[in-house]
Amino acid sequence: MWEIASGKEVLTVPSEGWHGDVLFSAEGSVLIGNVKGPINLHQIPAATPKLMDAKGLLLDFTPNGKHLLTSIDNTLLHLELAIRN
């Protein structure tokens, strides 16, 4: 990921290839992804992901950006995110 104004790289997310979902929070400070297994939370620009004890299809952040909506099969999950402001 790059900062648009400077073109400087601010985050590299290692993976075995993206075969999942990726969401950015509205203000752009959080990247959520799920490739295989648990959901990964990346606070930008920190590079160390936090593995969440959750799986599922990523749907959206709540308007305040502090919760994540996911689904597994026909079940909607509402997850509180532990993020710094």
Image (cartoon, rainbow, N blue to C red):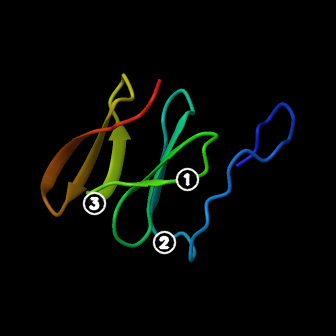
- Residue 27 found in image quarter: top right
* Disc 3 to disc 1, C-alpha distance: 21 Å
Q: Mark 1 vs mark 2: give the one in front.
A: 1
Seen from this angle, which residue lies furthest right? 6
* Disc 2 to disc 3, C-alpha distance: 13 Å
Give the crowd class for mark 2: few <14, some 14-19, many >=20 residues within 10 Å.
Answer: few
Reading the image, the residue beneath label 3 is 56
Q: Is residue 36 above or below residue 46?
A: below
Residue 75 vs residue 28, the one in the foreground? 28
Seen from this angle, which residue lies furthest bottom? 16
Q: Is residue 60 above or below residue 63?
A: below
Reading the image, the residue beneath label 2 is 19
Q: Is residue 28 above or below residue 78?
A: above
Q: Secondary structure at mark 2?
A: loop
The image shows residue 74 at horizontal and vertical percentages of: 13, 58
Whether label 3 touches label 1, CB < 8 Å? no
Reading the image, the residue beneath label 1 is 48
The disc, 1 or 2, on the residue closer to the chain's N-terminal end is: 2
* Disc 1 to disc 2, C-alpha distance: 20 Å
